Amino acid sequence: MNIRLKALVVRGFAVILTFLFQTALGLSQDNPLQRRISVQLREVTIQEALKVIAAKGAFLYSYNASTVNPNEKKSLRAEQKTVSYCLQQVLGDDIQLRSGGNHIIIIPNKNKRSELGNQKYVLEGTITDKLSGKAVKYASVYEAGQLKSALSDQTGRYRIELDREPEYVHLLISRKSYRDTVIVIKPKGDTPLNIRIRPATIDELQRIEPEIPSNLATNGLFQAVVSEEQVFHTENRIFFEERSIQVGFLPTLGSNRQFGGVIQNHFSLNVLGGYSMGLNGAEIAGLFNITRRDVSGFQLAGFMNITGGATKGIQFAGFMNNNIGRVDGAQLAGFYNLSLDTLRGIQTAGFFNLARGQVKGLQIAGFSNFSGKSLRGIQMSGFLNWSGKKASGVQVAGFTNITSGDFQGVQCAGFMNLSAGDMSGVQLSGAVNVVADSSQTLQIAALANFAHTLRGSQISGLLNIAGTVSGSQVGLINVSDTVSGFTFGLISLVRRGYHKLELSTGDVNPLMVRFRTGTYGLYNIVSAGLFQLNNAQFSSFGYGLGTELRARKKFFFGIDLELATVFQGQFLPNVFPDLWAKSNLYLGWRPVRGIQLFAGPCIHTYRIDENNLNGERPGIHRSDLFSEIRPDAQFFGWLGWQAGIRFF
């Protein structure tokens, strides 16, 4: 690799990393430090500035009075800046900011007692209910200064081991169904620090929602790798924090320690797997990534990605991607992708894709795609596409496409397309197309098309069936109830269409029986009769097409085209039948309902095969119009007539 190419690779990699680290769109509004406010302060005291910022951000402070100089004057101009930015501008770099519940804890950067040594210090005590006096178990106790935490046990006792004895202890106590409690106190040697917390009111309880979605909490992998302590810290809402980089081995072994469920990362590297509150950047894991809330950016896992909120970005997994919220972006997995809400983007899997909500984008799977509510986009699979309620776009499957509601667009399948509601567009299949309701579409199938109401066309190699047809049917057999258009095929059966039984005679056929079925615009003719030429008797069996127009209420005229085979005596395998083509033009009159009389001229064309020229039956010598002798046959044509009666 030359130097220039190396430089381009390094530059490209740097651009990608910069993009991944800068995709942050802001932390959840649960963290008061990330709330955006606008303030304008000119030469006001720090105490007054803190009051204005707290009012704008709707939060509370906890800090020791000696941490700040309340009378120092400050100015600040901020438009839609974070609370964290505003406080840093006012207080400077000598403080640290921590959030807990709706509190912001202000901590000095340097603890004076740290200069005395690094002797370990144990902070312990009990957590009790302020009203009942009973012990509160599984309460989260968080020391904000040194980022240490503990859970109270069954008796309410807690124990935190600090790296050194602090000048002031900044404690946050959080428990589900209780109010958050924040205290700043000077430690008193080994004296236990007992804390009482007050239960939340009924109104406050009604506003509390589970921090861990039920679909995530019951997930087998989540239950196996996320510790009970992490779950309680999450449900207790101990604090919410945003960190640039996280490195870990497993959810409990990493730089976020037991706080993975309450920390949002910008970049996370997990050797085996990780657990976090959210992602705003990039996350890579050897096996799995579990994100409690939203993902915005890029996730890569060798086994699976599980997201309890929404995804906005790209997820890669060797096995599966599981999203409880909506997906705006792309999911790519070797086995399957799952989105329990809306998908807006791309799902690609080697086995199947499932979106229980709407799909607005593209689903590609080697086996199946499923959309629970509606589809607006493209589904492509090797076996099956299924869309609930309604769909618009394109469905392409090697076997079957199914829409349980209405569909607008194109369905292409190797075997069958099914739309349980209305269909508007095109259906193409190797076997069968079905529209259970109204179809304003073109149906093309190798075997059969079915539609309740058709406003379009059905084309099949065998069978078309529809109720009301406003369009056309083209197939070997066409069946319908009512047609305002035309049907073209060997047999067209229209229940409320054209049905006639006919008896007729003519210049060479003493008796013909015909059955006509279809529509007035185009009907089929099946015929059988007696044929007489040169004093020889023949039998004929034929098929034809015709159309009929009504001139007035009782008069009509029509045109028929027929082709028949003609036999003399019994059918012999080694004797080729003659062919008789006939073009009929007739005028008819209906004296009463159900009976029609007709008569008119016709043109006969007769063909005798070479095997019959000197064989079992005599030839024909009538040639009023033309005669032609070829090596394989003789042709004769003449003018004739026919007349008859029709019933029905």
Image (cartoon, rainbow, N blue to C red):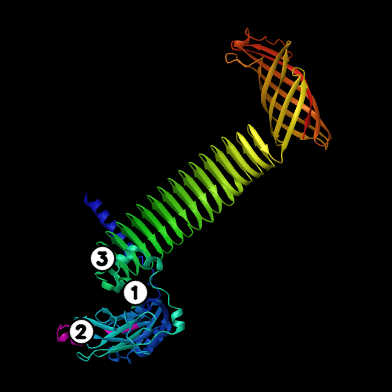
Q: Which mark is residue 234?
A: 1
Query: From where the camera sits, is residue 420 visible?
Result: yes
Q: Is residue 394 left or right of residue 280?
A: right
The amino acid on which the numbered mark 1 sits, given as a three-letter code, is Thr
Q: Secondary structure at mark 2?
A: strand
- Would you place residue 501 above or below residue 242 in this image? above
- Secondary structure, mark 1, is helix
Q: Label 2 is placed on what type of residue?
A: Val
Q: Residues within 10 Å of mark 3 (few under 14, many from 20)?
A: many
> Residue 486 at x, y = what percent?
67, 38
Decide: marks 1, 2 in contact (CB < 8 A)?
Answer: no
- Residue 87's disc number: none
Mark 3 and mark 1: span between their CA atoms? Answer: 17 Å
In this view, 433 is above or below 136: above
> Which disc is residue 250 wearing?
3
Q: Is residue 584 above or below residue 322?
A: above
Q: Does residue 113 appear left or right of residue 135 in this picture?
A: left
Relative image position of residue 159 (x, y in whole percent): 24, 82
Q: Earlier in the sequence, mark 2 or mark 3?
A: 2
Give coordinates of residue 14: x percent, y percent: 28, 60
| Amino acid type indicated by mark 3 | Leu
Q: Residue at x 68, y 43 (%)?
A: 481
Q: Quick one: 542 or 311, which is closer to the camera?
A: 542
Name of the residue lying farthest toward the top: 614
Earlier residue among tags 3 and 1: 1
Which residues are the magenta region?
104-121
Residue wearing tag 2: 122
